[in-house]
Image (tube, grey):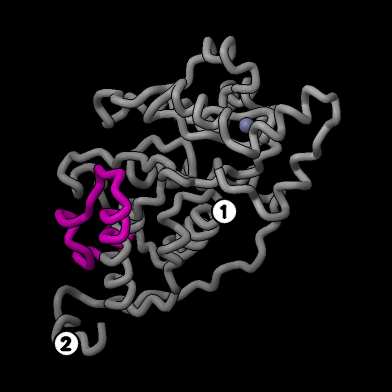
Amino acid sequence: MAGLPRRKAQQGSRTMAKNVESPQSPDPTEEKCNRYDLLDWLNKRLEIQFTRVEQICSGSCYCQLMDCLFPGCIDLSTVKFQTQEQTDFLHNYSLLQAAFKKNGVTKVVPVDELIKGKFQSNFVFLKWFKRFFQMNFAEQVYNPVEARKGQGIEPAKPPLGFSPRPASQGRKSASRSLNQSGGLETDTDEEGVGSGVRKHIIYLSTWEETYPWAKPSTLGDKYAYCSLCDINLNIHHSGLLDLKRHSQTKNHRKQSQAASNGSVTPTSVKRKGAHPAL
Ligand SMILES: [Zn+2]
């Protein structure tokens, strides 16, 4: 977008933003406690109830935070607050980038990373944004719900092909995670909020009778976890059929053969190398 007309700058009282550098290589132990604080901060600011950092990947939250900092820098009526479409995510980020440019914010928005819904990139960016916000916040009076005309902000769900966080975590935390504060690892809580009817298939533990290797996934109830292959499977289109399809993959058959021979195949090691196509 070269050659933005300078005249645009006239609108409103334009103040240049104070830029904030992003901290390099965040300490992973620090993240554990911080993500709750970050979400808590975001939830209060925007009067929303997000439970996972990944849910902000649609970009709409940032658009609204910019509107709070620099009133009028984004036309909020054009922000897609209720969407699960990646094209809408891109749209939101393009609004954000334009607002950054308008206000002299030099931070590069890693859009491609963010829209994938990965925890790490979204966490790092949110962390940066919070610092940026605090640096530029001048106690503006702001009613977030009113500003977005009463709309809720729909938590983004991890898009298809979303690669699981630590895959090894799957087995251990599958049941335990349900009890963590805010239902952090489960999708069930936000299902009911604003997304309307549940049209997709969700995981059923009865499937384990047919496929003993199937386990609930930490990614939520639209996924199943294969304890043999140590991977998460998207099951919300065909359910049991997705499991059947997976059971016929070359890799899975190899794993199950190895398991029945009693030889333990270190899947974690294998995953480091070329992952066999599904
Ligand atoms: Zn498998």
In the picture shown, does residue 214 fall above or below 251? above
| Res 184 seen here | no
Categorize mark 1 by other alpha carbons within 10 Å: few (<14), some (14-19), many (20+): some
| Res 137 seen here | yes
Q: Which residue bears the numbered disc 2?
A: 5
Identified by mark 2, the residue type is: Pro
Q: Earlier in the sequence, mark 1 or mark 2?
A: 2
Residue 227 lies left or right of residue 146; in this view the side is: right
- Residue at 40% in and 48% down: 56
Quadrant of the rendered structure where residue 235 is? top left
What is the CA distance from the residue labelled 1 to the residue labelled 2? Answer: 36 Å
Quadrant into which the N terminus falls: bottom left
Identified by mark 1, the residue type is: Gln
Q: Secondary structure at mark 2?
A: loop
Residue 26 lies left or right of residue 54; in this view the side is: right
Categorize mark 2 by other alpha carbons within 10 Å: few (<14), some (14-19), many (20+): few
- Pick out the residue farthest to the right: 263
Q: Secondary structure at mark 1?
A: helix
Which of the two residues, 164 or 141, is positioned nearer the viewer here? 164
Residue 212 lies left or right of residue 113; in this view the side is: right
Which of the two residues, 204 or 80, is positioned nearer the viewer here? 204
Check residue 6 for magenta coloring.
Answer: no
Q: Which-is-in-front pick, marks 1 and 2?
A: 1
Residue 101 lies left or right of residue 134; in this view the side is: left
Which of the two residues, 71 or 108, is positioned nearer the viewer here? 108
What percent of the width, then of the height, locates residue 270? 75, 47
Q: What's the magenta region?
A: 66-92
Q: Which mark is residue 120?
A: 1
What percent of the width, then of the height, locates residue 166? 66, 43
